[in-house]
Amino acid sequence: MKQGQPREYDVIVLGLGVIGSAAAYWSAKRGARVLGLEQFEFGHARGSSHDRSRIIRLSYFTPAYVQMAKEAYRAWASLESDAGEQLIFRTGGLDIGPRGSPVRMSEHVNSMRDCGVAFEELDAAEIRKRWPCWRVGDEVHGLFQPDAGFVAAERATAALRRVAVGFGATLCEGTPVTSLRAAAGEIDVEAGGRQYRAGKLIVAAGAWTNGALAHFGRRLPIQVTKEQVIYFVPRDPAAFTLGEFPIWIWQDEPSFYGFPIFGESKSVKITQDSAGKTVDAQTRGFEEDTGITTRVKGFLERYLPAALGPVDLVKTCLYARTPDRDFVIDALPEHPNVSVAVGDGHAFKFASLIGRILSDGAIEGCDLTAFTVTRPTLSRLDAGEDDERPAANR
Ligand SMILES: Cc1cc2nc3c(=O)[nH]c(=O)nc-3n(C[C@H](O)[C@H](O)[C@H](O)COP(=O)(O)OP(=O)(O)OC[C@H]3O[C@@H](n4cnc5c(N)ncnc54)[C@H](O)[C@@H]3O)c2cc1C
């Protein structure tokens, strides 16, 4: 594109998974001229945002995340109202695990207390009384948070795109971005054989983030892993229906999590968190990791046998992990009109809020200092090298 030619868009969003779709939604809602570019078909299963459900909860290990989660519920409510569709399902959420686990639930307790969030502490007897299918001994305890539940994931991402288009955004699928150039306060973008110019670029490319950032000479230590979820037809389906059973997270190492029955099938989704192997987003396969399936079955046999029926479905999905498992939500210091968001393995619940932050800048009440591009962990550690944070971050 020639120097001096007028920009056609205020904002170009690179990548239309849940975060890019949310950035397009909020930017278009604010009246910006928005172009969204997605390399594959909308709703594809090669990235991080497909499948039926993602946990949303206020129970987090720092007040900053709890505060953000509160804002995230508000951001989703705005979308539900614009879309005329229920996307958040409050099932209640159970954090459960052995006392003495490396995942200190006391951090969740303190963070929720700090932020005035309602929750209950449960001993094993109370857990067994409320949900008799949990076969846990007295060494286990839990936290119950009534607002937790799940986002209807694929539907939410589709709704973000649909409403963004309703607000005037142009969204293109099958349109890989192949070149990016920042010059004189404008961003020139080449995609699908065409040239575009915008005042601002939002990079929401998940596992492909470094491919996009390479155009600006920047690289983040992102580790891409192939995770897997397993749908089981429960032995006792009545115990796992929506309204009967909460979402749950086994807060230990390893960590497991699960959902009640939802969607078109009669199965429960359960898996081990952060169990996947490192892959390349371009060359990864979609095959089942039988090691994960075996570990999940072993866990269910021991603690939740009523859920362990035949396997209905196995799906794979990518995590784009940062070394400290905190997000990246920031502008590039050398190009303040280029923003980037990386969601690690737990950003779906926050995605509508992250989209709003990307379109608005900082949001009052949200402490974004942990999410900068320039934080020391992003320059100190190589991809794959973890800090001490236990896996159960989702
Ligand atoms: C198994 C699994 C379970 C999870 N569970 C939870 C949960 O319970 N709760 C929770 O909060 N979070 C959860 N997450 C995390 C959450 O799903 C992700 O953080 C979130 O989906 C990340 O969204 P994204 O938009 O950044 O990435 P993606 O959905 O991968 O989107 C990035 C998009 O950018 C596109 N793109 C990349 N490069 C280009 C290019 N050059 N040109 C055009 N397009 C491009 C890609 O094709 C892709 O569509 C889970 C993730 C997985 C994998």
Image: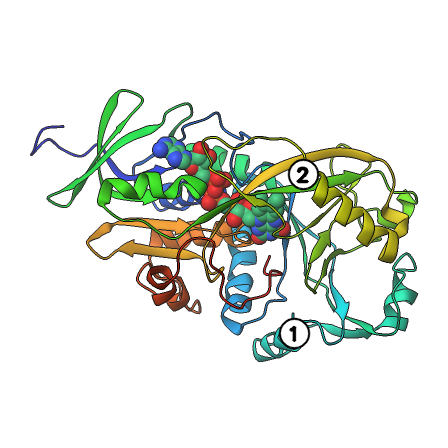
- Residue positioned most to the top: 193
The colour scheme applied to this rendered structure is: rainbow
The quadrant of the rendering that contains the C terminus is bottom right
Choose mark 1 or mark 2, whichever is in front: 2
Picture layout, residue 146 above or below residue 180: below
Q: Where, by quadrant of the figure, is residue 156 drawn?
A: top right
The quadrant of the rendering that contains the N terminus is top left
User: Toward the viewer: 323 or 206?
Assistant: 323
Q: In the displayed structure, does residue 394 sit left or right of residue 40? A: right
Query: Residue drawn 55% across and 68% down?
Result: 66
Which residue type carries mark 1?
Arg
Q: How many marks?
A: 2
Which residue type carries mark 2?
Asp
Using the numbered discs, state the Cα–Cα distance from disc 1 to disc 2 in whole angstroms: 29 Å
Q: In the displayed structure, does residue 77 sit left or right of residue 382? A: right
Residue 352: image x %, image y %?
49, 50
Q: In the displayed structure, does residue 244 sit left or right of residue 59? A: right
Q: Which residue is mark 2?
A: 289
Q: Which residue is mark 1?
A: 104
Q: Where, by quadrant of the figure, is residue 70 drawn?
A: bottom right
Is residue 216 visible in the rendered image? The answer is yes
Residue 96: image x %, image y %?
76, 65
Picture layout, residue 53 above or below residue 141: above
Picture layout, residue 283 above or below residue 381: above
